[in-house]
Image: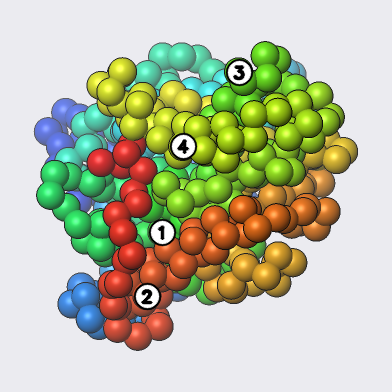
Amino acid sequence: MAVAELSTSCTKTHSSQLSLSSSSSSRFSHHFRRSFRPLPTTRNPTISCSVASDQVQTPIPVQAQDLKGKSECYGVFCLTYDLQAEEETKSWKKLINIAVSGAAGMISNHLLFKIASGEVFGPNQPVALKLLGSERSIQALEGVAMELEDSLFPLLREVSIGINPYEVFQDAEWALLIGAKPRGPGMERADLLDINGQIFAEQGKALNASASPNVKVIVVGNPCNTNALICMKNAPNIPAKNFHALTRLDENRAKCQLALKAGVFYDQVSNMTIWGNHSTTQVPDFLNARIKGLPVKEVIKDHKWLEEEFTEKVQKRGGVLIKKWGRSSAASTAVSIVDDIRSLITPTPKGDWFSSGVYTNGNPYGIVEDIVFSMPCRSKGDGDYELVKDVIFDDYLLKRIKKSEAELLAEKRCVAHLTGEGIGFCDLPEDTMLPGEM
């Protein structure tokens, strides 16, 4: 654990949960000391035992020393340095801790290098990457750390890797939860909700125990809306407003389709909202969107195309990509995560907004409360957001919003045992998982 004192050496330690060869284990099993990080505060972490799907999971407090699977610094990132002593770093901000789950996956393979380069948080923002993997992926995680090491990013001051979320999430100020089990052949959607829900329930507890109290959480692993709700419910000490489900890729796809139809570049498309669930019930909102500052329906006169072809193109874009590319989107997902973060840390342009799956309590649209639903947001650039009030609705839009709302309520009932709300009961109306999750 990094502390305030300056040390010129690393202390080797053995981590009992890391299944590695002795050479690879010794390569990254180091504790380290830095001159610029304050002593972290002590919090009581929690874990949960495995329960049957019809039982409610509740946090069980344990002592910190009972936790295993230490998160360790890697290679050159274990070296001691002093930011204040380096001339080029005098204009830098305070280092921030960014935790990433599924860090050995394809999306992370694109995302981590964008973060380390300064593209995400800015050219004067040093970062510490805290990478979460599994016993199966720990060798690949080492490979990721090696590539980050070889890239010589000046802003990347620390990299740590581990398989225990309670350790990896320690003092995290941003948590990008990408890792999730993919949907396999013959797997029912209810099964996927339960399997991935258990992952996000545990990660929510780990964030609650270990992360910064104001950590910002972006859930990418699908089904991301309900996974974000589960994570939030298991982290009661973190503001509910801090949890986001990623729908930014859907927004980006919608902007692209509108630009193509209108014959303009996509930077001319603004005020695009994705309402609802990240599934084929999502609602790309062309009623409030604008092209060159004009309402979309004034620019694109083919309203039948808007209501039918446009909506379907956005909803099924991931499936079409898989057929062309042979795999689901990774690079564009990473870009959308970057866009999502930057929308929260950069003031929203006047009159514009962005889409994010957020908690519905207190929303001004009449959407049912206590779910995570994609809605239009604005930010002052402080990491927080407010919901946009100056939007309009028609019968077409409201009908489709209600359909997505009903689906999310059904998903919520299905995972009640993971949110502390009773026994899970699945009555999902239809299989609406995006083709990209098949």
Q: Residue 11: in sight, yes or no? A: no
| N-term mark: 4 or 1 | 1
| N-term mark: 3 or 2 | 3
In the image, what residue occupies the spot 70% across and 65% down? Answer: 365
Task: Find residue 296 and report its horizontal and vertical position in percent.
Answer: 73, 33
Q: Residue 87: in sight, yes or no? A: yes
Q: Residue 283 vs residue 189: left or right? A: right
The colour scheme used to paint the residues is rainbow
Q: Nearer the viewer, residue 391 or 100?
A: 391
| N-term mark: 4 or 2 | 4
Task: Find residue 86 and report its horizontal and vertical position in percent.
Answer: 69, 22
Q: Amino acid at mark 4?
A: Glu
Asked whether disc 4 touches disc 2, contact meaning CB atoms under 8 Å apart, the reply is: no
Identify residue for label 4.
312
- The span from disc 4 to disc 1 (Cα, nearest Å) is 24 Å
When asked about the image quadrant of residue 337, the answer is top right
- Badge 4 crowding class, 10 Å Cα cut-off, few under 14, some 14 to 19, many 20 or more, is some
- The span from disc 4 to disc 3 (Cα, nearest Å) is 15 Å
Q: Nearer the viewer, residue 249 or 33?
A: 249
